[in-house]
Amino acid sequence: MIKVNQLTKQYPKSSHPVFKDLSFSLDAGQSMALCGQSGSGKSTLIGLLCGLDSATSGEIILNNTSFHDLSLEEKSDFRAKFMSLVFQQVTLVPYLNVIENITLPSLYTDKKIDESDVDHSLKQMNLMSVKYQFPHELSIGQAQRICLIRTLITRPKIILADEPTGALDPPNAAFIFQLLTDYCKTNQAGVIIATHDWSLAEQCDHQLWLTPRDAK
Ligand SMILES: Nc1ncnc2c1ncn2[C@@H]1O[C@H](COP(=O)(O)OP(=O)(O)O)[C@@H](O)[C@H]1O
Ligand SMILES: [Mg+2]
């Protein structure tokens, strides 16, 4: 599902690589926590895995496709078809209500989103009462759960989450981790979650540790 071979990333103006010759693989149905303190390269690795940035050397194979060989447009199509991203910041569109935000991906992909599926998820997460509310009317925990519903509703094969629980209290954070790891099992997806919270990282099948460059 996800295979990384000898990946090295060095930013142009930097004298050291963020990481060097990093290799790992993740099978379908497996989750991996990307651990390490701030500055260790978690976001850099997520940026490479989703194709928004390119590696200095090495190879990334996603769903049997060598990412390096794709054009920018092909990477974008690949992301729309197979991948979902989750960030620490809530990424809801402020002038769209909850249901409009959740169904937004159907506008730019060929994925159909069934409103009864959305209702099912909203009920499951105790969010039915906010279906027509706008993002500024939600708590951060509610807003991040809405982002998660939007991510999962298109049934992505790969989910990359960059500190999705960084702004949440422990119960909400644990809930989001549980949701992502359960999704991964039931949908045979590959899920990578960056976090600096060790107790949450333990909920994943695998843990990959990155160390900051100056500690190497
Ligand atoms: N666009 C960039 N240009 C140069 N250096 C960067 C850039 N983005 C991140 N870095 C550096 O790369 C290292 C890893 O950063 P980052 O991937 O954001 O770590 P983390 O997400 O684990 O906090 C840091 O030393 C950071 O300063
Ligand atoms: Mg980061």
Image (cartoon, rainbow, N blue to C red):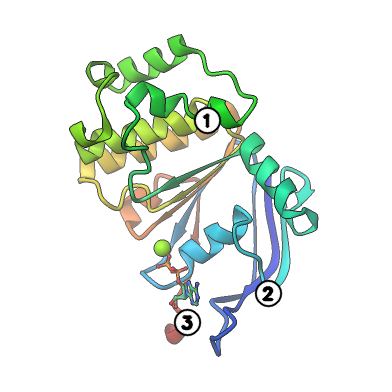
Residue 87 location (% of width, % of height): 41, 49
Q: Earlier in the sequence, mark 3 or mark 1?
A: 1
Q: How many marks?
A: 3
Q: Which mark is residue 56?
A: 2
User: Could you classify mark 1 by the number of other residues whose Cα lies within 10 Å: few (under 14), some (14-19), or many (20 or more)?
Assistant: some
Q: Position of residue 165 (x, y in %)?
A: 32, 48
**Residue 110 higher or lower than 139, as above or below:** above
Ligand 1 within 8 A of label 3's CB?
A: yes
Secondary structure beneath dot 3 equals: helix
Q: Is residue 155 visible?
A: no
Q: Amino acid at mark 2?
A: Thr
Pick the front one: 25 or 90:
90
Look at the numbered disc 1 and say if its residue's Cβ is closer than 8 Å to ligand 2: no
Residue 84 against residue 99 in the figure, above or below: below
Residue bearing mark 3: 213
Residue at the bottom extreme of this rendering: 15
Mark 3 to mark 1 CA distance (whole Å): 37 Å
| 23 with respect to 130 (left or right) | right
Q: Which mark is residue 105?
A: 1
Q: Is residue 52 left or right of residue 169?
A: right
Nearer the observer, disc 3 or disc 2?
2
The reply to whether the C-beta atoms of the residues labelled 3 and 2 are less than 8 Å apart is: no
Categorize mark 2 by other alpha carbons within 10 Å: few (<14), some (14-19), many (20+): some
The residues tagged by marks 3 and 2 sit, at their Cα atoms, a distance apart of 16 Å
Q: Nearer the viewer, residue 136 or 114?
A: 136
Q: Quadrant of the N terminus?
A: top right
Please name whichever residue, 131 or 167, is drawn nearer the observer in this view of the structure.
Answer: 131
Residue type indicated by callout 3: Arg
